[in-house]
Amino acid sequence: MKACDSLTRRLAITTALVVPIGSFLTRSIVDLPAWQHVGPIAWAAFSRHADIGNGVIYYSLFGIGSTLLAVATAISFRLTRASSGLRCAIPVYLTAAFAAGVILATTQAAPQMLSIRHPRE
């Protein structure tokens, strides 16, 4: 059984690197500046500021970009999988499915978060 083809392997490795690096950048670019802005206020205030502040653009680009990368990996695998087996198929397709699931969940959660401009005290 031949291993995953080279494009699929490169896409899978890139996806595996982008997600943790993106999480680190999320903390550095979005979360820490938001914490500095809100101080020791409730988590809801922090989340609201992060999601409505730098997070609006960053989360959108990162979320959509990483999902597209996962789907591109699955498509590449599908087009070249004749010589690959189940060993590659399961993680490739699960990654794309989970990434799509996160986007779907975000379409439900984001409008709720963005609608809360000021907390009730």
Image: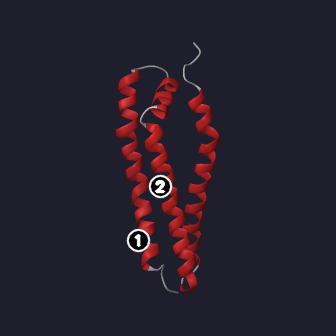
Q: Secondary structure at mark 2?
A: helix
Query: Is the C terminus in the top left, top right, bottom left or bottom right quadrant?
Result: top right
| Residue that mark 2 sits on | 65
Which is more toward the observer, 115 or 90?
A: 115
| Type of amino acid at the residue the image marks with label 2 | Gly
Across the whole image, how many numbered discs are drawn on residues? 2
Residue 10's disc is 1
Q: Residue at x 55, y 67 (%)?
A: 91
Figure check: 12 above or below 117 = below
Figure check: 79 above or below 117 = below
Nearer the N terminus, badge 1 or badge 2? 1
Q: Secondary structure at mark 1?
A: helix
Residue 100: image quadrant is bottom right
**Residue 3 position within the rendered picture, expressed as x and y whole percent measured from the top left:** 48, 81
What is the image's colouring? secondary structure
| Type of amino acid at the residue the image marks with label 1 | Arg
